[in-house]
Amino acid sequence: MTIIVQKFGGSSLATVDLIKKAALRVRTEVEAGNQVVVVLSAMGGMTDRLVEFVRELSTAYDRSEYDTVVSAGEQVSVGLMAMALKNMGLSARSWLGWQIPIQTSNIHSSAKIENVSIDKIQQSLDQREVAVVAGFQGISPQGRITTLGRGGSDTTAVALAAALQAERCDIYTDVEGVYTADPRFVSKAGKLDQIAYDEMLELASQGAKVLQRDSVQLAMKHQVPLRVLSSLTMAPGTVISKDCEATGPQIRGVVQSFSECKVQLKDISHDAIEHLSSVLNEAGITMDMPSHSLTPFASRWDYSFTVPEEDRLQAVKLLNLTVEKKKFSTITSDINVARISIVGPYLSENPNLVQKLFHTLAEKGIQVQDVSTSDIKISVLVKKADSEKALSALHTAYNLDVK
């Protein structure tokens, strides 16, 4: 029988009534003769409340205990969904990450999935049960609960779809698909009918919230077809697969990240740069947009990079320890920045598209602080106060506005 994985985000589960509506979507797939695995996030707003409880205690919290607290929201969701499905006359049971188990690395709050055991889930499906799985959570080699970072339920769903060789993985959310920009900030953003894995990976990496980056990376690795759909309408959504590549140079989307922190280090040696990179990597902190310039002292640099704003305090603390050991100068951090990126195939082959970015921002009086490029992406760092103006101007400049 065909296996379908359905994932519902928090906005699709914010109330008991919405959980009942999501259950109707599940029933439709069951009645079509499919075996169904449902992966759920916490109810809308619940994870934020749990995080706030932690932060009320301390800003320097134990991340393993943090995971114990914030993973609780998914347990509520799967229990309620299993009850809703049983009330409809379907056979269903809930599963937590450790029960499957979903085995992860030991980096708490941003763990990576290392293995998914499917035997128990497959037995459940063979008994005609709907398997209702808690997203976002797994278990470390030490037997502790881990979480996969915000949006991690997407990755749980794709990992299960890959392990079970599912026909497809449907991601249900509060928007009707993947857009050319965030509709909350660009009113003329249009929905994409389809997009290639690598393009979606760049959009997700640069700040698009519709899918977690790791989920797209995993889908691309295992060739899992994805659909992003609205849980509230019957719109066809956006298909993400290897067969969706655009032809010729064009911009597929403009995306922003408002939660960036720019870290600057003065008078640093080359070997110290390599050392701090490994320190942050071991702590599970992602560095982006590295930039450096020579100082008047030979072999010394002024070096800057960005990290997620939520990792700022931990990153600065770790680097201050590194400063003492490596004897380099000051560290400063700035959260009043934002990253704006354009994504599209063959960007490196079309200098006109690149020039248009800098020309558009210059016309609007927006200063570019740093630049990062790849074959299908160009990112610029600007002041946070200029970010929405930059986003809208570039969306218009690349003829992405819906008429």
Image (cartoon, rainbow, N blue to C red):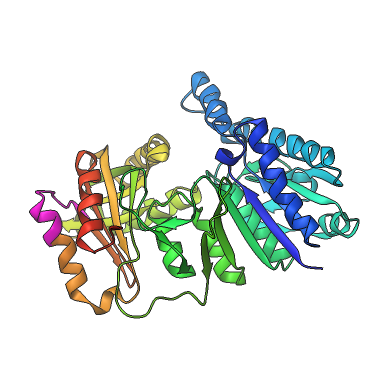
Let me know if residue 93 is in the magenta part.
no
Residue 33 x/y as whole percent: 81, 62
Taking depth in this image into account, of 231 and 279 the one nearest to the observer is: 231
- 161 relative to 387, above or below: below
The quarter holding residue 117 reads: bottom right
Q: Residue at x 30, y 67 (%)?
A: 251
Residue at 76% from the left image edge and 36% from the top image edge: 79
- Residue 400 spot, x, y in % from top left: 28, 61
Can residue 117 be seen in this snapshot? no
Image coordinates of residue 47 in percent, x first then y, are 57, 32
* Picture quarter with the C terminus: bottom left
**Whole-percent x and y of residue 179?**
40, 56
Residue 23 placement, left or right of 113 = right
Of 372 and 363, the residue lying toward us: 363
Which residue extends farthest top?
A: 57
Residue 153 seen in this snapshot: yes
171, above or below 200, in the image: above
Please name whichever residue, 209 or 380, is drawn nearer the observer in this view of the structure. Answer: 209
Q: Residue at x 60, y 33 (%)?
A: 70
Segment colored magenta: 359-370
